[in-house]
Structure formats: structure tokens, C-alpha cells
Image (spheres, rainbow, N blue to C red):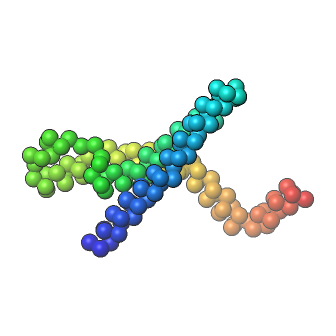
Amino acid sequence: MVVLGRIKRSVAGIGFWSALVILPFIICTRVFEIVARKVFGYASSFPQYLEWELFVFLVLLTLGYAYVRGAHIRVDIIRERLRPKACERIELVGLLLLMLPFALVVIYRGIIPIVGPQLLVISLAMAFPLLANWLPNQVFN
């Protein structure tokens, strides 16, 4: 139980502090986009994409905080009539049916395309160390 308590505090801390850090960046990005477009006539899609990415990052980091604090979406009208064991089972089924597919999509579409090529390059550099030294010499000399 001590380990679970530490994990719970860690998840809550990460969610809380990430919200405190990321929210000002989202607000500043939005203000920059509006001022740049309206005042200076600078139209770019980069601030909007950055805002979307920051928002997704914020949601992903704060989902655990909301879950630990009991602030996630649930139907309390049904839960108040059930026994605690039934509520736990509903929570587990909800996590497995809703969050697990989402997490798998994030891993498949986000982590594998980024980490896979990096691992390939690292393994090539380890297998052929002369190549790792030759390429920078060709580029920078």
C-alpha cells in the first residue's frame, strides 16, 4: 500500500504541476496568435498547431490527476446506489474499454514512429561505429 500511495501522489503531482506549467504556455500561444494576426497581419498556422499540441499534452498529463482526485467523468446517480465492489468493477471495465484502446493508439501512432527510427539509428551506430564517425566528418569537414 505504501508503493500505491507513492504512485498516487506522483501521478497527482505530475498532473498538478504540468497544468501549472502548460496552461500559461497555451494562453501565451493563443494571445500571440491573435496579436500577430490582428495587429501585425502575420498569419501562420504554427501557433495554432502548437496550441493544439500543448492542449493534448495537457489533457494526457492531467488525466491521471483527475482520476486520482475523483474528478473524472462518471455517472454518480448510478454509482451511489451500488456497492463499492460493483463501483470498482465498473471503473475497471471503463478503463479497459475506453482508456486502453486510446493508450494503444497513442503508442502505435505516436511512440513507435518516433522511437523506432531512433532505435534503428542507435543500433546502426553501435553495429558500425566507423559509420558513426565517418558521417559527421563528411558533413562538418
Total number of numbered labels?
0
Q: In this view of the protein, which residue sits in the foreground, 4 or 116?
A: 4
**Residue reaching furthest front?**
39
Q: Is residue 37 above or below residue 115?
A: above
Could you say where residue 134 lies in the image, as x and y percent from the top left?
A: 83, 62
Residue at (34% x, 51% y) in the render: 66
Q: In this view of the protein, which residue sits in the foreground, 55 or 110?
A: 55
Instruction: Please say whether residue 15 is visible from this viewpoint.
Output: yes
Q: In this view of the protein, which residue sits in the foreground, 22 or 31?
A: 31
Residue at (31% x, 68% y) in the render: 5
The quadrant in which the N terminus is found is bottom left
Left or right: where 140 falls relative to 36? right
**Residue reaching furthest bottom?**
2
Q: Quadrant of residue 64?
A: bottom left
Q: Quadrant of residue 78?
A: top left
Left or right: where 61 falls relative to 8? right
Could you say where residue 15 lies in the image, as x and y percent from the top left?
A: 42, 55
Left or right: where 79 falls relative to 28? left
**Residue reaching furthest right?**
141
Q: In this view of the protein, which residue sits in the foreground, 132 or 40?
A: 40
The quadrant in which the C terminus is found is bottom right
Could you say where residue 39 lies in the image, as x and y percent from the top left?
A: 67, 27
Residue at (53% x, 41% y) in the render: 27
Instruction: Please say whether residue 110 is visible from this viewpoint.
Output: no
Q: Is residue 79 above or below residue 34?
A: below
Residue at (12% x, 47% y) in the render: 80
Q: Is residue 39 above or below residue 66?
A: above
Could you say where residue 127 lies in the image, as x and y percent from the top left?
A: 69, 66
